[in-house]
Amino acid sequence: MDFYISWSHSDAIFCDYFDECCMLISAVPDNKHGLKKFKKKPQKLIIDSGALFYSKNPGKYKLRDILEIQKYIIDSAPSDIPIKLVHLDEPLLNKKTLSDKYSSVEKTLFNAYEYVNCMSKSNLPNNVSLMGVIQGFDMPSTKYCIHELKKMGYQNFGLGSMLARSPVEQIKYMKSVIEIVGPEHLHIFGVTGIQQIKEMARFNILSFDSSRPTMVAAFHQIIYSKPFRTYVISQSNVKRRTLLISKPLFCKCPVCLKHPEDILNISHRDYMKLRSIHNYYHLAKTIDEIKVNEGVL
């Protein structure tokens, strides 16, 4: 089970610190030249379409514009790492009516079909494969989407539309999809909960991504492992006032080995990036521990 860290142009460059770092990069304009800033390259890469960004800017960018950004990122990446390319989907967020929800599923499938056509003419490198986005607001619409994606030839799948679901619903939804496509072909988008990660390890799914290390760092919080817990920096104005921390604990992450006090500094974004590196280290340690406990290689 691979863990991909979600990355944006203003985030820490995680793969410069960790050799076995898999990354998900969304193909939004600010991320186009991102890989050129990396000293090291990620072990594996998913190039997402950036659908949430584009849904907030309707009509401004065409599908071919997004494809060009994705191709540029592919050309910037080394040819010896596996890359999965995700087609543009239509997010279900804020879709209230049944008609709007059906329309989102159909737009997602239309884009998936367009990607297959465009990519068949583009001579993709051997290290690049397509990932179909499973979009659905209930199980019948989800099954329909999977069926249509398979007809188009998709073999790798990414499951989205999870944000509006409770943790219990997320796990139930994942399990139902796994029974159709198989865990070895499934990536889960944007999962952050430890309980969900435990269940995914139990299901033996292929991979998932999370932006948790960065998001937690941005809100002046620090992750530690064994056991997994999150502290709020005592000097911050974060309203959550449980598990405060004013001094760094013992840690072997790349930041704490040199300047452990930097993770508590809330004065500048550069320190937030260092804090996210620390958080990544401990989340990755926790994921590894979960995989061992579940017998996942």
Image (cartoon, grey):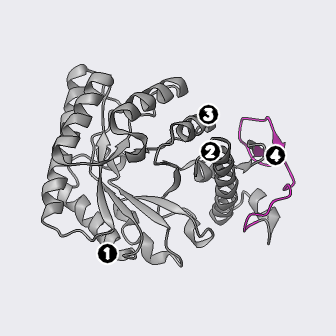
Answer with mark 4 or mark 3, whichever residue precedes in sequence: 3
156 and 194: which is toward the camera: 156
| Prevailing secondary structure of the magenta residues | loop
Residue 142 location (% of width, % of height): 29, 29
Q: Dot 1: what SS?
A: helix
Q: Which label lies toward us, 1 or 4?
A: 1
Amino acid on which disc 4 is placed: Ser
Characterize the local packing of mark 4: few (<14), some (14-19) or many (20 or more) Cα atoms within 10 angstroms: some
222 and 291: which is toward the camera: 291
Q: Is residue 101 above or below residue 202?
A: above
Is 243 included in the stretch rendered in magenta? yes
Characterize the local packing of mark 2: few (<14), some (14-19) or many (20 or more) Cα atoms within 10 angstroms: few
Residue 84 location (% of width, % of height): 35, 59
Query: Which residue, given by chain and number where applicable, does mark 1 sit on?
Result: 75
Q: Which residues are magenta?
A: 231-255
Answer with mark 1 or mark 3, whichever residue precedes in sequence: 1
**Residue at position x 73%, y 50% in the image:** 222
Answer with mark 2 or mark 1, whichever residue precedes in sequence: 1
153 and 239: which is toward the camera: 153
Query: Which residue, given by chain and number where applicable, does mark 3 sit on?
Result: 195
Answer with mark 2 or mark 3, whichever residue precedes in sequence: 3
Q: CA distance from mark 4 to mark 3?
A: 27 Å
Q: Which label lies toward us, 1 or 3?
A: 3
Query: Which residue, given by chain and number where applicable, does mark 2 sit on?
Result: 295
199 and 71: which is toward the camera: 199
Q: Which label lies toward us, 4 or 3?
A: 3
